[in-house]
Amino acid sequence: MKTIEVVAAIIHQGGRILATQRGYGEHQGKWEFPGGKMEAGETEEEAIVREIREELNVGIRVERKVCTVEYDYPKFHLVMHCFWCSMAEGELELKEHRSARWLERSEWESVDWLPADVEVVKELQ
């Protein structure tokens, strides 16, 4: 089984976290923390800053690493490095996602998260 290594941003603002809804692919409609695949030679932090700029057109401040989640999907093994981040500049622009929501802690379980992201939510609680 192939392994895919990705980064994800847990962007917080005013006590809420940002969830984004996939607009494409096998998991279309599911919710996730935004991010994506690392490129050769990038650090995890460089990758998450680049991915969020590409997907949401905003600059972020990486504050700390929260966890690394490993999850076996049917077709691949996912290794996801998750970072606690804040918005540094810009206004959210959804370039790849169908929707986005700022979730209060009481709303974290109100969206249909991708399985690996469920593990991140558990870690945050």
Image (spheres, rainbow, N blue to C red):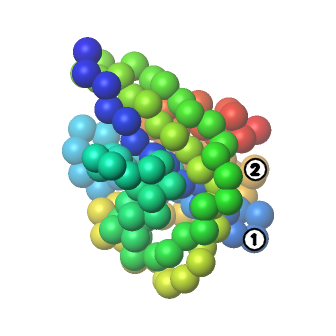
State yes or no: discs 1 and 2 in contact (Cβ < 8 Å). Answer: no
Q: Quadrant of the N terminus?
A: top left
Counting residues from the N terminus, which is met first, the one under dot 1 or under dot 2?
A: 1
Where residue 108 appears, as percent x and y from the top left, is 66, 47
The residue to which callout 1 is attached is: 14
Q: Residue at x 39, y 19 (%)?
A: 72
Q: How many marks?
A: 2
Q: Secondary structure at mark 2?
A: helix
Tag 1: residue type?
Gly
Name the disc covering residue 106, or none.
2
Tag 2: residue type?
Ser
The answer to whether 31 appears left or right of 41 in the picture is right
The answer to whether 24 appears left or right of 62 in the picture is left
Where residue 124 appears, as percent x and y from the top left, is 71, 41
Spatial separation of the CA atoms under disc 1 and disc 2: 14 Å
Disc 2 crowd rating (10 Å Cα; few below 14, some 14-19, many 20+) is few
Considering every residue shown, the one lying at the far top of the view is 1
Disc 1 crowd rating (10 Å Cα; few below 14, some 14-19, many 20+) is few
Q: Quadrant of the C terminus?
A: top right
Residue 103 visible in rendering: no
Q: Residue at x 69, y 34 (%)?
A: 123
Residue 63 visible in rendering: yes
The answer to whether 19 appears left or right of 15 in the picture is left
Against 61, is 106 above or below?
above
Against 110, is 71 above or below?
above
Q: Secondary structure at mark 1?
A: loop
Q: Residue at x 44, y 50 (%)?
A: 43
Observer-nearest of 117 and 31: 117
